[in-house]
Amino acid sequence: MKNKILRNGACLMLAGILAVGMTACGKPSAKKLSKVASKKLEAEEVPLEDLEDMESDDMQEALEDGILINTNGEEIEDVFEDEVEDLDFEKLGDAIDIDMDDWDLEDFKNISVYATAEGTDKMTQGELDEMVCVSAFVIEFEDSKKANELYADLMDKFEDLADDEFDIDVGNLNKDEYENKGNKGHLVLNLKSDILVDALVAQVEEQTGEDVDKDMKKEIEKSIGDINIVFALYYDNGVMTVLIGYGNDDMDDVTTLAKALGIKDPITVENSDEMVDGITAIFTGGITQYIAKAQEAAAMIEQHKADTQAVVDEIEEAVEG
């Protein structure tokens, strides 16, 4: 009798562990995102009608606390009737060479969006590492078979683009950062500041043919700051989930969201050299232009100071003479 009770208790405990495990690692959903955003991240739900009428200052203030939007394609079409009037999925498909002739907004069954942004005022001051922006959305499609076909086509295009434009062979990527099974898969980028610095140093050295000295590297590190860029796309039979993070190390929201949605935390993913070498060219290209403009502006300021001082010296000489 005692052994039977122990066996039954062990079975119940095992069943409980399996149930919890399956709940945590199950398929993401709009409902799960809505729950974690409102309960754990304390985001304020904003009706779609209110979102349309929000002024930019009000939106910025709301984003600092975090906002949650629950909607669907039909509601988007009703609320933003004028804005989506010219939306043509057929033309959109033609632009990327994918058949989307039979797609419309009603194919988007449920949509949940969470967004937060702090320190956006620092952008104009060049203090990009003071910003923290996190967003997530889950889209549940009306027809999973139809969505699977679209996803497969999109990933085929991505693989072609990766190979042709960024010299990335997806066969060399690790399974944490990329996987494509046709009806299920993911793409994860996790770029930290040291990766961007190294990539930019290599690019500058390639362009100039000279080694970057310590002072120049410090200037590059200063321009990039202590940031982390995260982009993660997950797809599972008619459900698409996207997590985006930008900022310093304080991006706990990304981890919280990933755990609640039952997907791998993108911050823990280490990208392969194959992915890093291809993707950082996009970011470093923009940063190179940023540094060039910053150095040009600094040179102009120094020249202006010199010109001003020359005028002052001339005035002083004239007064003394």
Image (cartoon, helix red, strand yellow):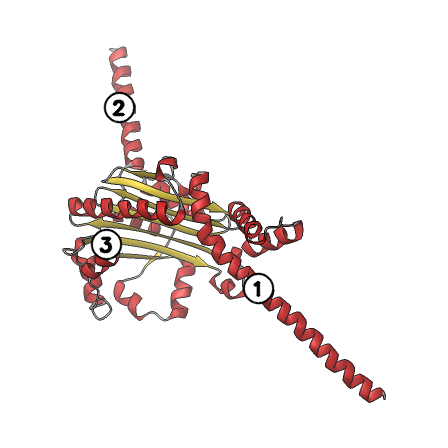
Q: Is mark 3 on a helix, strand or loop?
A: loop
Which comes before the other along the chain, label 1 or label 2?
Answer: 2
Q: Mark 1 points at which residue?
A: 294
Q: Is mark 2 on a helix, strand or loop?
A: helix
Q: Is mark 1 on a helix, strand or loop?
A: helix
Q: Name the residue under label 3.
A: 97
Residue 271 visible in this rendered orientation of the protein: no
- Which amino acid lies under the numbered mark 2 shown in the image of this protein? Leu
User: Which of 33 and 105 lies nearest the eye of the viewer?
Assistant: 105
- Which amino acid lies under the numbered mark 1 shown in the image of this protein? Ala
Query: Residue 145's spot in the image, x, y percent?
Result: 16, 44
Q: Mark 2 points at which residue?
A: 12
Q: How crowded is mark 2: few (under 14 residues within 10 Å), some or many (20 or more)?
A: few
Identify the image quadrant of residue 305.
Answer: bottom right
Asked if the residue under mark 2 is in contact with the one under mark 1, i.e. CB atoms within 8 Å, the reply is: no
Q: Is residue 100 left or right of residue 68?
A: left
Q: Distance between the residues labelled 3 and 2?
A: 53 Å
Asked if the residue under mark 2 is in contact with the one under mark 3, i.e. CB atoms within 8 Å, the reply is: no
Q: Which of marks 1 and 2 is in front?
A: 1
The quarter of the image holding the N terminus is top left
Q: Residue at x 39, y 40 (%)?
A: 265
- Which amino acid lies under the numbered mark 3 shown in the image of this protein? Asp
**Looking at this rendering, what residue extends furthest in the right direction?**
321
Q: How crowded is mark 1: few (under 14 residues within 10 Å), some or many (20 or more)?
A: some
Q: In this view, does 213 lie to the left or right of 167?
A: right
Q: How crowded is mark 3: few (under 14 residues within 10 Å), some or many (20 or more)?
A: few
Q: Distance between the residues labelled 1 and 2?
A: 65 Å
